[in-house]
Amino acid sequence: MEKKVNLFHPEEGSYPPVKNPAGIGLRHAHYKDVIETKPAVGWLEVHPENYFGGGAHRHYLTKARELYPVSFHAVGLSLGSTERVSRDHLRQIKELIEIYEPFQVSDHASWSMSGNAHLNDLLPLPYTKETLSILCRNIEETQEFLGQRILVENPSTYLSFKSSTMPEWDFMNEAARRNGCGILLDVNNIYVQSRNHGFDAFEYLRGIEGRHVGEIHLAGHTEQEIADGSTVLIDTHDSLVRPEVWNLYGFAIEKFGPIPTLIEWDQNLPPLSTLAAEAGRAAAIIRERALPHAAE
C-alpha cells in the first residue's frame, strides 16, 4: 500500500522522463510518415480506445513505440458519470499499458455515458461537492485498477451551471488533492472558456496548484457567431495554435516549469511537418521561459 501512495503522490516538480518535452498526437493519417521520417518531437500521444481492436492500428503503434515514448489519453472512461467506470474498458486500457508502457495515462473531468447511452462528446459537470465526490470515486477506482496515477484534463465547455459552488480551478485542485491524481492542463480549453464564460484566463492559471500539473495541451480553436449575434469559441483541434493561446502558454510554463506539452490536432490534419513545427515552438518556449525552474 505504501508503494501506491508514493506512486500517486509524486514529488513536487518531478516531471515524466522524456528528453524533449514537446510531443504530437499520433493519428492514422501520419502513421507511415512518423515511422519513415522520424520527426524531431519528443513523444507521441494516442487515444487507447483506437487500439482496442488490434489489427493495423496496433501494428503501427508498435512501430512508433520503438521510436518514441508514448502517452495514453483516454476519451471513454466517463469519469464524471454517476455510474462506476466500466471494468471492461479499464481492462482493455490496462492490457495496452502492459504492452506499450506509456509514461502517462489521462482522461477528462467530464461525462459521456449514462446507462446504455454512450455519447460522442465530453459533457460538462456542475462544480459542486456532490459532483466532486463522484469524480473522485471514479478516479480512485481507475487508479486502483490500473495500479498507477492518472492525469485528469480540464474540459472545454460552452455552458455553465447555476448550481456550481466553486470555480473550475478549485474543483480540479481538490480532485488532485483527494486522489493524488495529476492535472492535464489544457491551455486552449482555458482560453476558450475564459472567452465563453467571461473570466480571466490568467487568474485560472494562478489558481492551479503547480505540484499537480503533469502535462499541458495546446490546440487550435474556431470562432462561431450564434443566433443572438454574439461569438462562441469552439475547441475544434483543427488549426494552428492561436497567438493568444501561445501567450497564455508562456505564462503557464513560467509558473509550472518544463511540463511535457502536446500539440493536439484531430481534424483537417496538416502535413506532419506542420505539427512538428508547432511542437518545436512549444519546446522553444519551454527552453526560454522555464529557466527559473531549471536553476532551482
Image: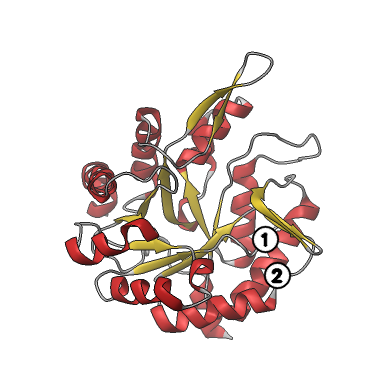
Q: How far separated are the C-alphas under marks 2 and 1?
A: 7 Å
Position of 228 with respect to 46 (left or right) is right
**Badge 2 vs badge 1, beta-carbon distance below 8 Å:** yes
Q: Relative to the observer, which residue lies in front, 287 or 280?
A: 280
Q: Relative to the observer, which residue lies in front, 100 or 149?
A: 100
- Name the residue located 34 percent from the left edge and 77 percent from the top edge: 62
Q: Secondary structure at mark 2?
A: loop
Q: Amino acid at mark 2?
A: Val
Q: Amino acid at mark 1?
A: Ser
Q: Secondary structure at mark 1?
A: loop
Q: Which residue is mark 1?
A: 78
Q: Position of residue 213 (x, y in %)?
A: 46, 55
Q: Which residue is mark 2?
A: 85
- Name the residue located 36 percent from the left edge and 66 percent from the top edge: 16
Q: Where 206 falls versus 30 (above or below)?
A: above
View extreme (top): residue = 229
Q: Relative to the observer, which residue lies in front, 62 or 285?
A: 62
Q: Position of residue 264 (x, y in %)?
A: 41, 49
